Image (tube, helix red, strand yellow):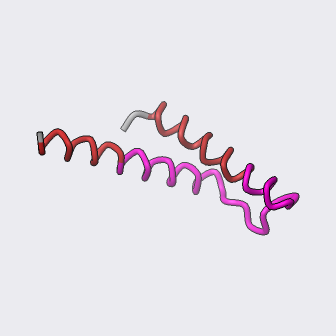
Amino acid sequence: MDPKAVEKLEAKIEAAVAEVIVNMGLKKLPLLPSRHTFQMMAKAAVAVYEAAVENRRREE
């Protein structure tokens, strides 16, 4: 798993959460996800993507 891809995606997930906060007119979420949560979400997304790419290669 590419650490740079995880880091980049983690930042995008965090930005998306911040955007939701703003769009809902909230100052902050009642329970803001931790840095660890953002990292785990990013790692899971990258793992799913990599698995999909590998499955696609096998099908070709």
- Counting the numbered discs, the total is 0
- Where does the image place residue 48, in percent across and percent down from the top left? 35, 51
Q: Residue at x 58, y 51 (%)?
A: 38
Q: Which quarter of the rendering shows the N terminus?
A: top left
Q: Main secondary structure of the magenta part?
A: helix
- Asked whether residue 31 is drawn in magenta, I would say yes
34 vs 60, left or right, is right
- Where does the image place residue 21, in percent across and percent down from the top left? 78, 57
Q: Residue at x 50, y 48 (%)?
A: 42
58 vs 11, left or right, is left
Quarter residue 57 falls in: top left
Q: Residue at x 68, y 44 (%)?
A: 15
Of all residues shown, which one is farthest toward the bottom?
Answer: 30
Q: Which quarter of the rendering shows the C terminus?
A: top left
10 vs 32, left or right, is left
Q: Relative to 15, is 2 above or below?
A: above
Q: Residue at x 74, y 50 (%)?
A: 18
- Asked whether residue 33 is drawn in magenta, I would say yes
40 vs 51, left or right, is right
The region drawn magenta spans: 19-48
